[in-house]
Amino acid sequence: MRRLSPDTLAALPAEVARPLYDRESQEVGIVHFGIGAFHRAHQAWYTDAAMNAGDRDWMITGVSLRSPGVARQMNPQGGLYTVAEQSADGAALRIVGSVRNVLVASEEPDAVIAAVAAPATRIVSLTVTEKGYCRQGDGGSGGSLDFDLAHSLSFYYFVTQGLLARAKAGLPGVTLLSCDNLAENGAILERLMRQYLARHEPDLVDWFDQHCTCPATMIDRIVPATTDEDRAAVAAALGGLEDEACQDEACVVTEPFSQWVIEDRFAGPRPRWEAVGAQLVTEVAPYETAKLRMLNGAHSLLAYCGLRAGHEYVHEAIADPALRSLAEQLMRNEAAPTITTAPGQDLAAYADALIARFANPSLNHRLIQIAMDGSQKIPQRWLETLAHNEAHDRTCPAIREGLSAWIHHLQGHNGPVDDPLADKLSRAVKSDTPMIALFGEGGPMAGIWTLKV
């Protein structure tokens, strides 16, 4: 079976979209930490579209901090991979060409630092998940940097060493672009980077402040984990001729919808992402808040309540009338009243669109995948909504039901708990009063919202 590569592009079926630019003539302009499925279906996808529209020199060097898996998948393919947009009407396939190569930081640290320090690099972006920012505690109010965690193969070291080399060489600063589901992700990244620099390279702090920026972003695209069945279906669609299927080990499956809202505050040049669907704005917060409290809040609700009800996928959970009613209650009656909208932002229409997206039968988005790392997600998705409503004497029955289902999850009823605070949370839910143990004064989840007893 042949493998997707620059040499096999010409043999693909005509209906498969592919790069329209000369990849080999383009320089790397972006270094991205955390080149998982979401980045491949989102930021790299937008960057590929921008280069298809005529932008130049925005190829991406991906960095995997620990696992060599993605590098083993993508490097033999010359960085190429397929994005399969799944809907009820079938799949639309596109070969994305914006990734030049993938480095494994644990195996080639000097190469990662050199990539950040390269003169052509103007953007360093990150999709490292909430826990990748190495914040203390539950990360409430942004959290402070946990220096012990940050010392062990985090992006902070590699970015710092790359910036240090740039400063010594007299090169421009870079834009540090967080693409993670964190409220005020730009401000959080900037503060944590300054803390790391102040501890390890204090002379670099002023240079960082003067030459680098950390814009806020809001990202949105459902990207379920790619299965062996997905890979087989993509391979068959790429094959064209019987017995000559073109295998794509790095393919990702996603929905047709995508959204990227970016604060227009860059340290230097950037791709024209706005020409291919991204929104460049002065204020990201209204979009970010709606996404976190409505979409992500409903996702977590469906995950924990759906697992407790015996469902496996999001589309199964939203088809359950009781769970759909809970999701509607959370989005429309609990989350929406807490959001100050931007001009033209229609939260009722947004809720309608979310329900339709959740119901997409072609996306086998596993609830257990969404249930991971609840301690890092629930503060922004549920607790901020709870605190706001409580301050206005309003109740949140849907979120309370979600918290009950999360406790059920933490008690191990859905299998092993995948969470950086698993030990603390497991001890808390063994209490006779788990809500108090978790959210009462001194509990591991108290802070943004503290249970009054």
Image (cartoon, rainbow, N blue to C red):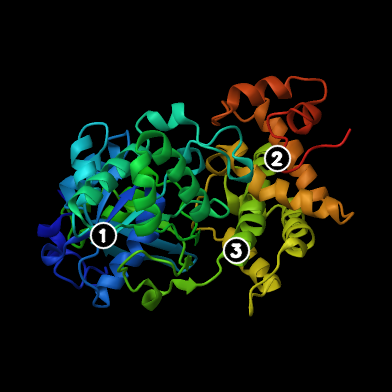
N-terminal-most mark, 1 or 2:
1
- Counting other residues with Cα less than 10 Å from the Cα at mark 2, is it few (<14), some (14-19), or many (20 or more)? some
Q: Is residue 302 visible?
A: no
Q: Quadrant of the C terminus?
A: top right
Q: Position of residue 294 (x, y in %)?
A: 66, 58
Tag 3 and tag 2, C-beta contact below 8 Å: no
Q: Is residue 320 above or below residue 57?
A: above
Badge 1 marks a residue whose secondary structure is loop
Give the residue at x 37% y 34%: 200
- The tag on residue 309 is 2
- Residue type marked 3: Ala
N-terminal-most mark, 3 or 1:
1
Nearer the observer, 90 or 202: 202
Give the residue at x 20% y 73%: 20
Q: Position of residue 90 (x, y in %)?
A: 42, 65
Q: Nearer the viewer, mark 1 or mark 2?
A: 1
Q: Which residue is disc 3 drawn over?
A: 285
- Residue type marked 1: Pro
- Residue type marked 2: Ala
Badge 2 marks a residue whose secondary structure is loop
Q: Position of residue 35 (x, y in %)?
A: 34, 48
Tag 1 and tag 2, C-beta contact below 8 Å: no
The residues tagged by marks 3 and 2 sit, at their Cα atoms, a distance apart of: 34 Å
Nearer the observer, 349 or 344: 344
Nearer the observer, 106 or 258: 106
Q: Which residue is disc 1 drawn over?
A: 172
Q: Is residue 232 above or below residue 360?
A: above
Q: Is residue 205 visible?
A: yes
